[in-house]
Amino acid sequence: MQAEKKPVRKAIITDAGFASRYLPVTKTLPKAMLPLGNKPIMQFMVEECVEAGIEEIIIVATPEGKPIYEDYFHNSVIRIKKQLSQQGKEERYEPVQHILDYPAKITIITQDESLPYGNGSPVASAQKYVEGEEAFLVIYSDDVVFGNPGDAKTLVDAYAAHPEADAILMAQTVAKEVVDKYGIISFKEGSDNELDNIIEKPDLGSEPSQLASYGRYLLKPSIFEYLNPSSTGKDGELWTVDAITEVAKRGKVLIETTKGEWMTTGDPENYFRAHLKYVLEKEKYGGKVLEWLNEFKSS
């Protein structure tokens, strides 16, 4: 008997930008390969998808980043495994085996160079991989979510409860004094969970809510009606949010609040904050960090 097809089987994770704020390191290394502890940011995204039961993950990378991601997720480095075995240090290989054992298929592609600049172009580049799906996830690798369940599972569960939704977006409450730094959710009149539109960086005091949207979406293939080269917006770029707003005009786009904690790694300062939080809370040496800071301050 054939198994029933899951409503949400695939996810697109994007890391196809220039990451110019991180140069020179991102000349060689994709931004989402920067570490939190000893794991790259991208691994957190992949594990979030695995937790949600996603069966195939499409990573959209730069041409330079593609072989790096292929190596990271598919190369078993047998020579290292053999050497560690000879040294009696087999346990050090376990994190590598963990990656190789992910149940999800990981496919690496590059962004379609014919598409305009913009954060929607990596998503549009993966269109053929999700055509025919009932729904799929989109995850921007700038956005790390700490905590359980991850946003991917929250989105999948929300769609199971609301299959009539044309899209579902994740959001997090931010302080009133910083709403002008984010895309802020505006709800349809009379609703507390249905999107009207997203107000980019509203003036303080004019914000429609304190819910900030970030790069975690559940979408349907119908999004590509609006996410295409003829639908560019501000600065001539292709924006995923513009396409979602068009969907909201004609259908139902729901908002889910994260059950974890969203932090951006889109610039070096915020990346450092996220890295520091992870080290303090998760790494064995995290408890020493404050001691080190005091040492540095007194030296």
Image (cartoon, helix red, strand yellow):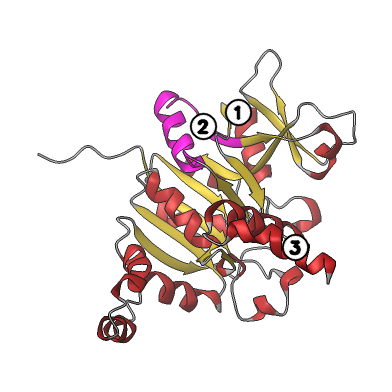
Q: Is residue 98 left or right of residue 265?
A: left
Q: Name the residue beneath numbered marker 2.
A: 166
Mark 1 residue crowding within 10 angstroms, few (<14) / some (14–19) / many (20+): few
155 over 123 or under it: above or below: above
Tag on residue 64?
none
180 over 50 or under it: above or below: above
157 drawn magenta? yes
Magenta extent? 148-170
108 over 216 or under it: above or below: below
Q: Are marks 1 and 2 in contact (CB under 8 Å)?
A: yes
Of residues 87 and 241, the one nearer the viewer is: 87
- What amino acid is labelled 2 in the image? Asp
How many numbered badges does the structure rendering display? 3
- Quadrant in which the C terminus is drawn: bottom right
187 drawn magenta? no
- What amino acid is labelled 1 in the image? Arg
* Quadrant in the picture for residue 122: bottom right
Q: Position of residue 98 (x, y in %)?
A: 34, 63
In front of the other: label 1 or label 2?
Answer: 2
The local secondary structure at tag 3 comes to helix
What is the distance, in whole Å, between disc 1 and disc 3 at their CAs?
A: 53 Å
What is the distance, in whole Å, between disc 2 and disc 3 at their CAs?
A: 48 Å
* Quadrant in the picture for residue 179: top right
288 over 165 or under it: above or below: below
The local secondary structure at tag 1 comes to helix
